[in-house]
Image: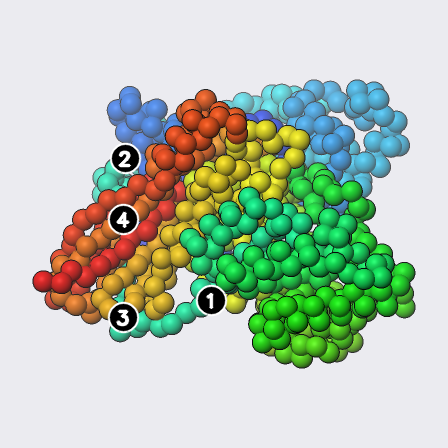
Amino acid sequence: MVSSLQSCTCNLSSSHGLIAVFRISYAYLSEQLGNPFVNLRCTSICENNPMHREIQSMAQQILSYYVSSSPLDRFRLQASCLDLIYLLIRFFTLADTTTAADTAQPKSDRMLSILRYLHQNYNQPITLQSLADHFYLSIPYLSKLFKKNLGLNFLKYLNKIRIEHAVEDLKATSHTVSQIAFEHGFSSLASFNRTFRDIYGQSPSTYRKDCASEIRADDSQQFLRQFLERHPFRVQSNSIPPLICRADTLSAQPYRKNWQDTLSLGVASDLTHSWAQSQIAQLKQSLHFSYGYVWRLFCKETLVTPAAQTFNFSYLDSVLDFLTQTEIIPFLDLGFRAKQLVLNVNSATNTDTSSRISELTVAAMDNPSQYKNLLSSFIRHCIERYGEKNVETWRFCLHFDPGIPFSGDGLSWFKIFSDTSGCLKTYLPSAHLGMIGIFTYDDNKTFEEFLSQIVKKEYRLDFIGVSIYPYSLMQEQSLNNPASLDESFMLHKIHALQKLLMNYGLSEIPLYVTEWNLSFASRNYLHDSIYKGAYIIKNVIDCLHQTDSLTYWGSLDLLYEYYDSNQMLNGAPGLLSKNRIPKPAFHAFSFLAHLKNQLLSLGAHYIITMDGRNNYCIVCHNFCPPNTDYYYQYGEKISCEKVDALFQTAPVVLTFRIDNVKTGRYLIKKKFVNQKSGNLLAEWIHSGKPDATSMDEQSYLSAISIPRQTSETADAENNVLDITTILESNEIQLLQVIYQLE
């Protein structure tokens, strides 16, 4: 893909080669997307992207329709062209590069309005004065805006737009150079020639001659038709070729189920309620996670404050008693995390009455001895109540607060960590204490600063926990929506963080993902959709061998209640709805919980496991990301009715071929969640979106929003077992393969 302001040369190495040029109007893209900045890059020679093959196939299809004599193929041609544009925008959009290299600030809404106006009216006699008058700005201020945001002055930027449009007409029309100049806003032919020569180094007439085709349009179409007859493309048919997913029982290996290591449960005061405990017990029974992350232990709600003369741990005892009785190992945050509800990525709401920095932080600042006294008392109490042997198996952490510096003469995060470690290790020398909560949205700068302090001060941590959400600072500057287009964002982020650990010589410190989800917001209906289930399974498969702990953020919708959440579903990130109905996200983790303990094979769409007794378990998905409407238009504020329209229909056929199995008959029990099965959000909408108090509708939705189940048999011949299944867009499946005794 080449910009209209660039020149390129193509050389054919074979007489069977073909060069085809597809021209896409920049003005059309800008108008349709409502964004004056559309930057695409697609270079299959230099980049390795699986979508290149899809682009090539689509281009071949377009050429076939172009030479077709069928009137119906004219419509298919237009549809395919739009599909091609969709793929380019969806997978090859770059962040805006018009900003000066040394400018990191995002453009203001005012600047974007100015640029949209220029792109819409570039062919009018616009001057700096008229533009300033239109937006009620002074000329010096307007000039400064252009220089600061674009690195160009007003006239150069306007002429750049005009030349981009003029070049398209020079190539594609027979209009005279003078006509093209005036149609695109130039006041004279001389100014057009001068501007054009400054950019291209030649006159418009010479440029047109160089670009002129040696074959007229009618002749080129005939030539293309004859070429395709001699060298036909293999255009995809309507049938979907299966993806062969191979496995061999001889390669079985044990593996760590890192997604079952920890589940974030909530703040301690919420977990004292019976409704929370009963729902968490339901999650434990179905999902089999080991640790439960709990924070905000010390606050007014738990009746434990640092300044007290004596401490009443009764509320905390009720939480810890519940965890131990339910066989959930406590993962306790001894830090300063507040209870915060994020309605969207630009709005965080404190749902407690305290300030952003907790009382424990204030105590650590004003009177460190109070904090250490509280912590020592709590640890001694836990040892006396639950036994030293049990408490040593617990995990402890401090959550990073960006309001506290890493180091310094006054209060610093590492000073608090040192005090905490001293108290904990005095009573529990082998207890694990780490840091969690560093967000990586800032291109890992905070994480890197943290590592440099560890090396400089020689601090010892038992683990480091990071929070990963698919947000990109560069994406936010480009699209005003931070949601990243990278479908494997978490995998790539983990790789980047591990590389930093290695660079600082800290690779021996375990890296935990202690917080992850598709959105930081508590009001995003994608949380309730079948897309969420596919998203979870895809990321678990991607990151299976990348970290020892993969802690999903969000357990119960009821923990995210606020004044706006009167409906049964409101886009909260929990696994169970407020009426404790399992959502697709729950079903995803439930499917994963059935996996056996020996890993056979892992692929982009699947994971295959076995138990060593001729039984197998397969979990697979057909993850399909949302279309560009999510990134360009709705973002996280999308309504529940528009969720389905975000996803295209793209089924996939998977054939699992397992070698060296026991010959005989196998029973295959399939459970699946798709648009029509186990889809709580769709069923809720179809039922008229009943509120949370409607008991009859709750019972109905609870009964109908479960995975569908089917059974069939397959015979293994010559020690090979083949199983084929079809998945719709964002469908997830659990295949339990059981050997049948004769």
Disc 2/disc 1 C-alpha distance (Å): 51 Å
Which residue position holds label 3?
612
The kind of secondary structure element at disc 2 is helix
Could you tell which of marks 4 and 3 lies nearer the N-terminus?
A: 3
Nearer the observer, 660 or 137: 660
Nearer the observer, 610 or 511: 610
Task: Name the amino acid, label 2.
Answer: Arg
Q: Residue 670, labelled with which disc? A: 4
In the rendered view, tell whether residue 548 sits above or below residue 541.
Answer: below
Could you tell which of marks 2 and 3 lies nearer the N-terminus?
A: 2
Which residue position holds label 2?
225
Task: Name the amino acid, label 3.
Answer: Gly
Nearer the observer, 617 or 474: 617
Could you tell which of marks 3 and 1 lies nearer the N-terminus?
A: 1
Which residue position holds label 1?
545
Could you tell which of marks 4 and 1 lies nearer the N-terminus?
A: 1
- Residue 442 in picture, x, y percent from top left: 69, 54
Nearer the observer, 500 or 234: 500
How many residues crowd around disc 1 within 10 Å: few (fewer than 14), some, or many (20 or more)? few
Q: Residue at x 75, y 22 (%)?
A: 126
The answer to whether any part of residue 499 appears in the image is no
